[in-house]
Amino acid sequence: MAKEIKHGVQIGATPDVQSQEHILDKLNEERAVAIALTPHHDSFQQCVADVVTESCPNGDATIIELGTGTGTSTEVVLKTNPNAHIIGVDSSKKRLDRARVRLQDNSDRVELVNQDFEEFASTLPDSSADCIFTAFSLHNLPLEQRRSILTVIAAKLKSGGVFVDGDKHGFENPEDNESAFSQQINLIRDNFAAQPEMRDLWENHYKEDFEIDEPREAYKRFLESIGFEVSFRLEYGLEVVVVAKKI
């Protein structure tokens, strides 16, 4: 089966029918876990999509997704904005293979690139993107790497362009932070009470994320320091949709 080449990068073949059936099962499992751990999952993703659509209502916009993963957010943006064309970038070929199946009905409106985001961004002219968005992706990276990526994003966006980040960001107030984190841990324990391995896996994952998390107020100040005007949308516990407009 022929490989697909985009931006000079080999991004894999479209899976065959049997693989698609397997992948669809995995996508359904993934969604069930996402909703169990994030009850507001759908409204949160919809908020990200709404902000992207508000920022780029027309079909000639350059919209880039950082950390496309299996295409959850991509799908919502495409459904919300019928004019959208998206370049989705992710370093995981396996996850992009799943995204390709999820997004097959809109394959003409999405380009999936298997590449590190900073490497991909180096091929883009400065001030060339209208919108860059991401959801539940950057929190997995060390703070220094996140800030490096954010600086790249600022350089690649046009003046007036928008960066949308739906992700985990705690609070500077220790009591608020601990309360929100405890609620999340309790949610994990309740949902996986009968599955101790899954419970321990997700609890450890959230604890690791919490240790490297950056309070949303500190995140806002950093974004402002590199040329953004910042607001928060749809805050749920540790999750918040951060909207940063390049000044």
Image: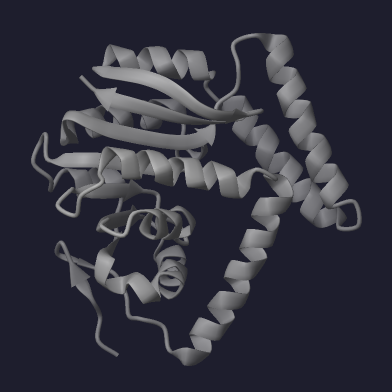
Q: Residue at x 19, y 34 (%)?
A: 157
Q: In the figure, 76 relative to 175: above or below?
A: below
Please indicate whether residue 209 sits to the left or right of residue 233 in the image: right
In the rendered image, residue 204, in percent from the top left (x then y), is placed at 72, 40
Q: In the figure, 31 relative to 193: above or below?
A: below
- The mark total stands at 0
- Residue placed farthest to the top in the image? 173
Q: Residue at x 70, y 45 (%)?
A: 39
State which quadrant residue 90 falls in. Answer: bottom left
Please indicate whether residue 18 sits to the left or right of residue 198 in the image: left
Of the 4 image quadrants, the one containing the N terminus is bottom left
Of the 4 image quadrants, the one containing the C terminus is top left
State which quadrant residue 185 falls in. Answer: top right
- Between 140 and 221, the residue placed more toward the observer is 221
Q: In the figure, 93 relative to 67: above or below?
A: below
Snapshot colouring: one colour
In the rendered image, residue 201, in percent from the top left (x then y), is placed at 74, 49
In the rendered image, residue 242, in percent from the top left (x then y), is placed at 44, 28
Q: Residue at x 47, y 13 (%)?
A: 218
Please indicate whether residue 133 sits to the left or right of residue 183 in the image: left
Q: In the figure, 83 relative to 147: above or below?
A: below
Q: Residue at x 83, y 50 (%)?
A: 191
- Between 118 and 227, the residue placed more toward the observer is 227
- Residue placed farthest to the right in the image? 194
In the rendered image, residue 176, in percent from the top left (x then y), is placed at 70, 15
State which quadrant residue 48 falls in. Answer: top left
